[in-house]
Image (cartoon, coloured by chain):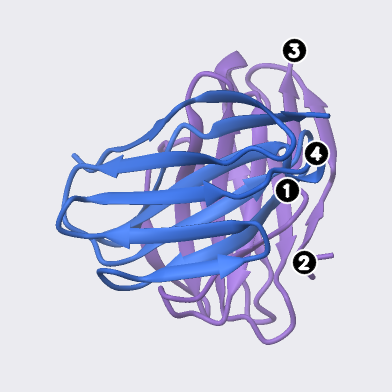
Amino acid sequence: ELKVEQNPLFLSMQEGKNYTIYCNYSTTSDRLYWYRQDPGKSLESLFVLLSNGAVKQEGRLMASLDTKARLSTLHITAAVHDLSATYFCVLQGAQKLVFGQGTRLTINP
Amino acid sequence: DSGVTQTPKHLITATGQRVTLRCSPRSGDLSVYWYQQSLDQGLQFLIQYYNGEERAKGNILERFSAQQFPDLHSELNLSSLELGDSALYFCASNRGGDNQPQHFGDGTRLSIL
């Protein structure tokens, strides 16, 4: 069974700090997505990672994919309050998308 | 605004009833995906349609069914509703490729009393 596990599930940090969210998955896949969800809102696509070693950056967020380790990371640089949200790691399985539990990120001024 | 429209935004009904959720994809998108988000199960993929045909199936109950019409809008039908069906139901769309990001609607919040 394809499983996606995120770590940590809850993260409270101060503005200006750096942190990383980890996403481990159980079977081979070469397609992984990161989404953001604000409270009570819909999901916003952040990154699509298609191959081993892929790295994508958008503003203060950087995502990477290591298919050999079955690991993706979402790194936050110099966090700002606007990045407070829940972040989901999503894996493309065989004809199926599997979501991680989500990491609820709170950034305090 | 993602361009994906879901109606209604909120739905309150009773156990045993049947409801229909509607989704209009972004202009030009051929694929429609349905998801369920609940506190205990998290986000789960239910089903995907591509240009009117079912393409992939996830954790969709037999009491649930979906279809995509010639104009590409989609409907998710939920019947014999149970308390545990209370959740936020999202629709997403993309052009059709698995490597394309999906654009999500604002969701329909279903409450079963």
* Quadrant, the C terminus of chain B: top right
- Colour in which chain B is drawn: purple
Q: Name the residue tied to disc 4.
A: A81
Label located before the other in sequence (4 or 1): 1
Measured as percent of width and height from the top left, residue B86 is found at 65, 23
- Colour in which chain A is drawn: blue
Q: Quadrant of residue A57?
A: bottom right
User: Which is nearer the eye, B36 or A75?
Assistant: A75
Amino acid type of the residue tagged 3 in the rendering = Leu
- Position of B110 with respect to B30 (left or right) is right
Picture residue at 49% right of the left edge, 25% below the top: A9
Measured as percent of width and height from the top left, residue B49 is found at 49, 68
Q: Name the residue tied to disc 1.
A: A42
Q: Name the residue tied to disc 3.
A: B113
Label located before the other in sequence (3 or 2): 2
Per the model, the C-alpha gap separating discs 4 and 1 is 19 Å
Image disc number at residue B2? 2
SS at mark 1 in the image = loop
Amino acid type of the residue tagged 1 in the rendering = Ser
Q: How many marks?
A: 4
Answer yes or no: are tags 1 and 3 on the same subunit.
Answer: no
Answer yes or no: are tags 4 and 1 on the same subunit.
Answer: yes
Q: Quadrant of residue A100?
A: top left
Per the model, the C-alpha gap separating discs 1 and 3 is 24 Å
- Position of A80 with respect to A58 (left or right) is right
Q: State which chain disc 4 sits on.
A: A
Mark 1: few/some/many CA within 10 Å (<14, 14-19, 20+)? many
Circle 3/circle 2 CB separation < 8 Å: no
Per the model, the C-alpha gap separating discs 1 and 2 is 9 Å
